[in-house]
Image: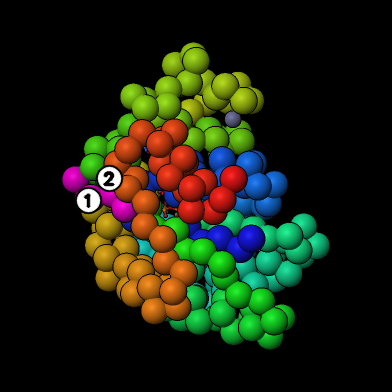
Amino acid sequence: MKIIMLGAPGAGKGTQAKKIAEKYQIPHISTGDIFRANIKNGTELGKKAKTYMDQGLLVPDELVCDLVVDRVQQDDCKKGYILDGFPRTIPQAESLDAALSRLGEAVDYAINVEVPDENIVKRMGGRRACVGCGATYHLVYAAPKKEGICDNCGAELILRDDDKPETVQKRLGVYHEQTQPLIDYYTKKGILKEVDGTMDMGDVFKAIVEILGA
Ligand code: AP5
Ligand code: ZN
């Protein structure tokens, strides 16, 4: 099963993608997580990506496409995968489709997690990310057991640099301009599925499982 998660920044793509990956035993491939890991490790890719991410801009397609196309051809992706944060532009979607069609494959589902902008701004201010393992929390909706400390690894929880209010507004603008056209793109291919992302996390997950089948 090859799944794409679509949705605005903070719509809950990462939260749901992790649960889907676990349930269906497929790899969760998040381009945001890949870039953040590269930034943490001080790689050349990380240095380049950071300059865009800190401004709320998309990293250029040429830095993203090859990376994902290589990743989905690795052995652990044979039974499927869930892409979170990719594609984010029409050229990225076209490059994925071209690569998959060379392999005689195609995406099965594009799941759009729909959340209005007003809710997004509120959610992002409450998100906290672990500096150790990258796990995501929310001060209200998914609080850690001990304030400021990751349940998984005990490291500190911080506000992501790109979750500051002015950067969130910028990211939303970029989303509407560059990523939202993908909804049309996948509707035309007949694989778009809409899910109401304003429900609580468990209900959003149930709605996705109904689409994918248990
Ligand atoms: P990325 O990490 O992909 O960021 P994003 O798409 O902006 O998504 P987020 O991680 O912010 O949100 P999410 O939808 O995963 O929400 P989450 O589950 O955490 O990318 C970061 C940057 O990297 C980009 O801006 C860009 O610069 C670059 N980049 C990445 N991919 C790229 C690409 N393909 N091309 C170019 N550049 C790229 O949830 C948010 C919060 O809400 C959490 O606190 C969570 O606990 C909470 N929450 C989740 N669901 C619910 C719910 N149902 N109810 C209440 N709270 C909820
Ligand atoms: Zn952690």
The label on residue 151 is none
Q: Write the start and end of the magenta stretch as one range.
A: 114-118
**Between residues 70 and 115, which one lies in front from this camera angle?**
115
116 falls in the magenta region: yes
State whether residue 135 appears in this view. Answer: yes
Three-letter code for the amino acid on which mark 2 is drawn? Ile
- Crowding around mark 1 (Cα neighbors within 10 Å: few <14, some 14 to 19, many 20+) is some
Three-letter code for the amino acid on which mark 1 is drawn? Asp
In which quadrant of the rendered view does residue 30 lie? bottom right
In which quadrant of the rendered view does residue 201 lie? top left
Which residue, as the protein is rendered here, is positioned at the far right? 75
| Circle 2 residue | 120
**Between residues 13 and 50, which one lies in front from this camera angle?**
13
Left or right, residue 10 beside residue 152 = left
Colour basis = rainbow
Q: Position of residue 160 (x, y in %)?
A: 42, 41
Q: Is residue 66 above or below residue 54?
A: below
| Circle 1 residue | 117
The C terminus - image quarter: top right
The N terminus - image quarter: bottom right
Residue at 66% over, 76% down: 105
Q: Is residue 162 above or below residue 157?
A: below
Q: Is residue 201 above or below residue 165?
A: above
Q: Secondary structure at mark 1?
A: helix
Residue at 59% over, 56% down: 82
Labelled pair 1, 2 in contact (Cβ < 8 Å): yes
| CA gap, disc 1 and disc 2 | 5 Å
Q: Position of residue 110 (x, y in %)?
A: 47, 64
In which quadrant of the rendered view does residue 127 lie? top left
**Between residues 165 and 92, which one lies in front from this camera angle?**
92
Residue at 27% over, 57% down: 172
